[in-house]
Image (cartoon, grey):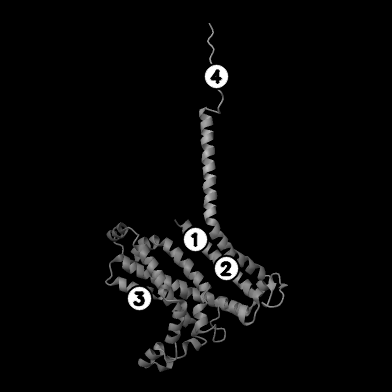
C-alpha cells in the first residue's frame, strides 16, 4: 500500500543558507537606512559648511588666477600671481620674518612649556595653580588687547624704558617698536608671552596622564631630572607636542593682529609678514588676484605642515 504525502506549498527558501541570506539583506537594508538618516541629520550643517567655507575657498582659488582691482572687470592672469609671489622682494622679506616668528611664537613657548611641565611633574610645586593662572592669562585676552598692552609696554615712556632708566641704563632706552633693528624681536617676545600659557597648560595636563609608576621606576634607577624628562616626560607628551607644534607654527604663519595693531609692518618693512602683504594687496592698493594667491599659498603651506606633524606623531606611536 502506497502512502501519499502532501507537499507543503513553497513559501520561500527555508534552508539555513536562505535564512542567512534574508538576514544579510535585512542588515544591509537597515545599514542603508541608518546611513541615509545620518546624512539627513548632517545635511543642514554640510550645506552651511559648503556655503560659508567651500564656496569662498573655490572663489578665492579662481580669483588667484585673475587680475582684479575689485571694481573693473577681471582679466585672466594664469600663474602670474603665483610667480609674483615668489619673485617679490617684499614677500621674500615677509617669509624671512615668518621664519623668525616661528622661533618666538613656537619654539621658545614649547621649550618653556616643556620645562614647566618637567618641573611640576617631578614634584609638587607650592601655589602651582596661581603660577599656571598667571601664565595662562594671555590666552584669555584677545589679540587686540595683547597688542595694545605690549604697545604700551614698549612705548618711549613705558615700563621697559622706565626700568632701564631706573638702573642707569639710559643709553639703552629707545622706541622699541619704531626701531628698525629691535621692532621684530620686540614683537617676537610679545608672541612668546602670548603662546607660552597655552603650551604650558597642555603639557602640564599631559603630564598628569603619565603613570606615576614610570617616574618612581626612573627614580629607583637613579635618574636625575634631565634623564627623567627625556625618558619619561617627553615620550609621554608626544601627542600634546604634536598639537602644540601645529597650533603655534600655524599661528606664526598667519600672525596679523599683533603686528598690524602695533607696527603695521613697519618701520618700513622691518616687521612685515605675508598676511600684512595680503591685506595691503587686497585693500590698500587693490590687487585682489595677488592677495588671493597669497592666501592660497598660505593655506596650502598650513595644510602641509599640519599633515606632516600628524603623520610624524602617528609614526612615532
Looking at the rendered structure, which numbered label has been put on residue 7?
4
Looking at the rendered structure, which numbered label has been put on residue 134?
3
Q: Are marks 1 and 3 in contact (CB under 8 Å)?
A: no
In this rendering, is residue 301 above or below 42? Answer: below
Mark 2 or 1 closer to N-term?
2
Closer mark to the observer between disc 4 and disc 3: 4
Closer mark to the observer between disc 2 and disc 1: 2
SS at mark 1? helix
Q: Are marks 3 and 2 in contact (CB under 8 Å)?
A: no
Q: Dot 1: within a 10 Å radius of its alpha carbon, few (fewer than 14), some, or many (20 or more) residues?
A: some
Mark 4 or 2 closer to N-term?
4
Mark 1 or 3 closer to N-term?
3
Disc 2 target residue:
299
Can I make out residue 92 in this image?
no
Mark 4 or 1 closer to N-term?
4
Report the side of 119 relative to 92 (left or right). Answer: left
Place of residue 101 in the rendered image (x, y in percent of width and height, measured from the top left): 50, 76
Mark 4 or 3 closer to N-term?
4
Quadrant of the frame with the C terminus? bottom left
Place of residue 172 in the rendered image (x, y in percent of width and height, measured from the top left): 43, 91
Place of residue 273 in the rendered image (x, y in percent of width and height, measured from the top left): 55, 78
SS at mark 2? helix
Mark 3 or 2 closer to N-term?
3
Amino acid at each position: 500500500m502506497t502512502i501519499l504525502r502532501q507537499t507543503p506549498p513553497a513559501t520561500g527558501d527555508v534552508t539555513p543558507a536562505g535564512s542567512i541570506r534574508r538576514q544579510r539583506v535585512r542588515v544591509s537594508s537597515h545599514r542603508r537606512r541608518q546611513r541615509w538618516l545620518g546624512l539627513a541629520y548632517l545635511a543642514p550643517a554640510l550645506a552651511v559648511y559648503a556655503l560659508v567655507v567651500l564656496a569662498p575657498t573655490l572663489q578665492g582659488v579662481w580669483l588667484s588666477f585673475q587680475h582684479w582691482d575689485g571694481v573693473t572687470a577681471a582679466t585672466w592672469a594664469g600663474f602670474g600671481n603665483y610667480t609674483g609671489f615668489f619673485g617679490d622682494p617684499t614677500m621674500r622679506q615677509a617669509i624671512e620674518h615668518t621664519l623668525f616668528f616661528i622661533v618666538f611664537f613656537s619654539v621658545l613657548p614649547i621649550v618653556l612649556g616643556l620645562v614647566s611641565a618637567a618641573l611640576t611633574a617631578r614634584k609638587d610645586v607650592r601655589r602651582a595653580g596661581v603660577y599656571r593662572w598667571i601664565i595662562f592669562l594671555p590666552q584669555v585676552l584677545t589679540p587686540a588687547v595683547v597688542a595694545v598692552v605690549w604697545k604700551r609696554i614698549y612705548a618711549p615712556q613705558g615700563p621697559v624704558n622706565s626700568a632701564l632708566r631706573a638702573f642707569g641704563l639710559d643709553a639703552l632706552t629707545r622706541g622699541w617698536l619704531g626701531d628698525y633693528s629691535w621692532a621684530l624681536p620686540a614683537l617676537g617676545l610679545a608672541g612668546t608671552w602670548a603662546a607660552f600659557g597655552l603650551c604650558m597648560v597642555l603639557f602640564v595636563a599631559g603630564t598628569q596622564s603619565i603613570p606615576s609608576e614610570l617616574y618612581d621606576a626612573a627614580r629607583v634607577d637613579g635618574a636625575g631630572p634631565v634623564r627623567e624628562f627625556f625618558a619619561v616626560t617627553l615620550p609621554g607628551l608626544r601627542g600634546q607636542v604634536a598639537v602644540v607644534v601645529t597650533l603655534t607654527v600655524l599661528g606664526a604663519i598667519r600672525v596679523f593682529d599683533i603686528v598690524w595693531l602695533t607696527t603695521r609692518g613697519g618701520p618700513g618693512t622691518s616687521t612685515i609678514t605675508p598676511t600684512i602683504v595680503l591685506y595691503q594687496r587686497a585693500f590698500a592698493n587693490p590687487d585682489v588676484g595677488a592677495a588671493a594667491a597669497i592666501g592660497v599659498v598660505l593655506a596650502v603651506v598650513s595644510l602641509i605642515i599640519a599633515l606632516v606633524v600628524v603623520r610624524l606623531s602617528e609614526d612615532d606611536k
